[in-house]
Amino acid sequence: MSKQKHMALLLVFYLAIAACFLFYLIRLDYSQVSAMSLEASFLAYSVIFAVIFRYWGVFTWQVILRELEGKQVPGLVPLGAVYAKAWMARYIPGTVFWIAGKIYLAQSLGISKSRLAASSLLEGGMQIVSVISVSLVLLTFDSRLDTMLQELKWFIALVSLVSLTCLLPPVFNRVLAIAYTLVKKSAPGDELRINLSAIAKSFLLYACGALISGISFYFMCRAFYPATDSQHLLYLTGAYNLAGALGMATPLLPSGIGVREGVLFALLAVIFPLEIALSLTVVGRLWSAAIDLLFFLVASAAQKFVASPVAQ
């Protein structure tokens, strides 16, 4: 099949999905949306945790770089500026732009391209694995999801297990060495090898980051729908992270748009009226984009006005 026909089929497929979704939206009773309002205090909490989550990602990246034979790693301010700029590239279709952008920009900090490539691969894989793992722990035993096919739960768990296996040092290092040899026609150096310490630390850090991100989303729901019960905290944390992880695993869509929202809407509809679930899903996407922009502005300002020493 030619590339043009393939793209045409994809376009028809997505248009059909959009048409079905639009038909579904028209049939909703939007009178329930009047129950939504804005609580500024909860919104402020949400913003604080959201920014902390993004800087937690910068800190995790710093730890991974240090583990990959890095004796000296730039501080959080210069790394944060690079991370924030590359983070905005997630809105360009294709995960490669986010990864390539970070590698390209971080070279100006004196970090080798090979170490950046290895850290980016480990980051991307471990982030998906750890986030899905946290989500499964929070959602699998939730009685409200008894309607979810047990086979689907096992499939998600299997994907997470396979991904984690691929990230184990012997497997990861072997695959990376083969790829490097094919491209560079030479043997890779030690800086391309990851160790068990890097795996364990990155998994734990990303798992903690998932909890921070989930708390931020919970406060966002409380901000726009005050009737959100505090008992939903763990469920919302798991739902938001699972949707985000599946969105990250869809590299051809900008920032996982569509996949992430579809999963999140389905999970929110379990605890909220359909109209509220839809509204929170849409607001959540806009809120996430706004926080990304805020993160970029804060990181850029910090780089401009704060001198950061090299992390020892």
Image (cartoon, rainbow, N blue to C red):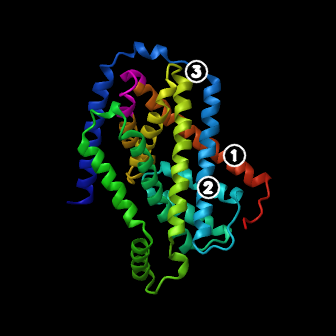
Disc 1 crowd, CA 10 A, few/some/many (<14, 14-19, 20+): some
Q: Is residue 19 magenta?
A: no
- Which part of the image, by quadrant, shows the C terminus? bottom right
What residue span does the magenta drawing correspond to?
265-276
- Single out the residue that lies furthest toward the left: 1
Residue 61 rendering spot, x and y as whole percentages: 59, 60
- Is residue 12 in view from this perspective? no
Q: Secondary structure at mark 2?
A: helix
Position above or below: 252 against 115? above
- Which is closer to the viewer, label 1 or label 2? 2
Spatial CA span between label 3 and label 1: 24 Å
Q: Which mark is residue 38?
A: 3
Q: Which residue is mark 1?
A: 298
Pick the residue in front: 68 or 249. 68
Pick the residue in front: 35 or 21. 35
In the rendered structure, which amino acid carries the disc numbered 2?
A: Val
In the rendered structure, which amino acid carries the disc numbered 1?
A: Val
Q: Secondary structure at mark 3?
A: loop
Pick the residue in front: 61 or 148. 148
